[in-house]
Image (cartoon, rainbow, N blue to C red):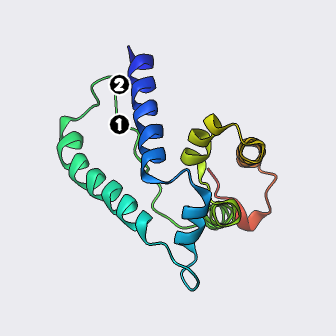
Amino acid sequence: MKGIVALICGLAFGIGLALSGMTDTAKVLGFLDLFGTWVPDLMFVLGGAVAVTVIGFRFVLPRGQPLLGSKFYLPTNAGIDGQLLLGAGLFGVGWGIYGYCPGPALSALVYLDMKTFGFVAAMFAGMALAHATTNFKILPPFLQTGR
């Protein structure tokens, strides 16, 4: 049952990203170009997502546990450290260079664009590298969090 619900949610998310223009790299890069030809459309997409999250969390979190799980998995670390800053910077660079963040990139694979396949491959390689450096502590000491 969890797999079917996850598939339905993933499909709804991907379709929503496509309908909102988040899978159009030109539109995303236009949104990020604040001092050039700024395209404000995606501000409404982001605002809508924040509004749904804020309202939804007020109804869902008091339940104590999700419908199809044993507990909620919410972030517990509220600190800002080197790993967070490096990750946020890399995320922003990737988004600014190509116009995709992970969700829209995966959704855009259906367009069969080889550049998008390359972006997703690089994204997965970066995730694997981040996982390896976090677990094996091969990062420089100033980027380690001690987790």
The image's mark for residue 132 is none
- Circle 2 — which element? loop
Residue beneath disc 1: 72
Residue 143 percent across, percent down from the top left? 71, 64
Q: Residue at x 79, y 57 (%)?
A: 139
Residue 56 pos. (x, y %): 23, 46
Q: CA distance from mark 1 to mark 2?
A: 8 Å
Residue matched to label 2: 69
In this orientation, which residue lies closer to the viewer: 129 or 32? 32
Local secondary structure at mark 1? loop
Q: Are marks 1 and 2 in contact (CB under 8 Å)?
A: yes
Quadrant in which the N terminus is drawn? top left
Q: Residue furthest bottom?
A: 35
Total tally of numbered discs in the picture: 2
Q: Give the residue displayed 64% in from the left and 58% down from the top.
A: 145
> What's the residue type where badge 2 is placed?
Gly
